């Protein structure tokens, strides 16, 4: 039977495309422009933009971790 590190490596390798697709859907769903029309437009826009950028960074780190 396969050793545990080999199985873990195969699972991580196969997770890379799935993580990429799901992350793209998540990142595209965060739209800072929905803050338009609110009284705190600038603050809400910055917070949503920050959330989008941090989620992109988190996805990059997860994909990087799956690569190793």
Image (cartoon, rainbow, N blue to C red):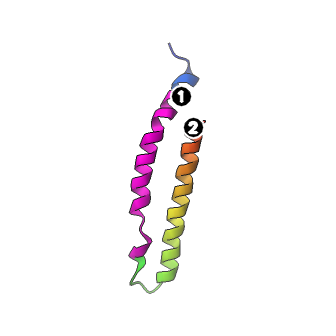
**Residue range corresponding to the magenta coloring:** 9-34
Circle number at residue 68: none
**Placement of 40 over or under 24, stated as above or below:** below
Q: Position of residue 20 (x, y in %)?
A: 45, 46
Query: What residue sits 44% from the left and 41% below the top?
Result: 17
Q: Position of residue 39 (x, y in %)?
A: 44, 87
Density class for disc 1 (Cα within 10 Å; few <14, some 14-19, many ≥20) is few
Callout 1: SS: helix
Image quarter of residue 34: bottom left
Q: Residue furthest top?
A: 1
Residue marked by disc 2: 67
Q: Main secondary structure of the magenta part?
A: helix
Query: What residue sits 52% from the left and 56% below the top?
Result: 56
Asked if residue 32 lies in the magenta stretch, the reply is yes
Between label 2 and label 1, give the one nearer the viewer: 2
Query: What residue sits 54% from the left and 44% below the top?
Result: 63
CA gap between label 2 and label 1 equals 11 Å
Image quarter of residue 38: bottom left
Residue contact between numbered discs 2 and 1, judged by CB atoms under 8 Å: no
Residue marked by disc 1: 8
Which comes sooner in the sequence, label 2 or label 1? Answer: 1
Query: What residue sits 55% from the left and 23% below the top?
Result: 6
Callout 2: SS: helix
Q: Position of residue 37 (x, y in %)?
A: 38, 84
Give the quarter of the figure containing the C terminus: top right
């Amino acid at each position: 039977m396969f050793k545990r590190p080999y199985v873990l490596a195969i699972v991580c390798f196969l997770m890379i495309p799935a993580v990429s697709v799901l992350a793209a859907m998540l990142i595209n769903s965060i739209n800072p422009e929905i803050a338009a029309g609110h009284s705190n437009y600038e603050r809400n826009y910055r917070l949503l933009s920050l959330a989008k950028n941090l989620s992109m960074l988190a996805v990059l780190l997860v994909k990087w971790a799956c690569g190793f």
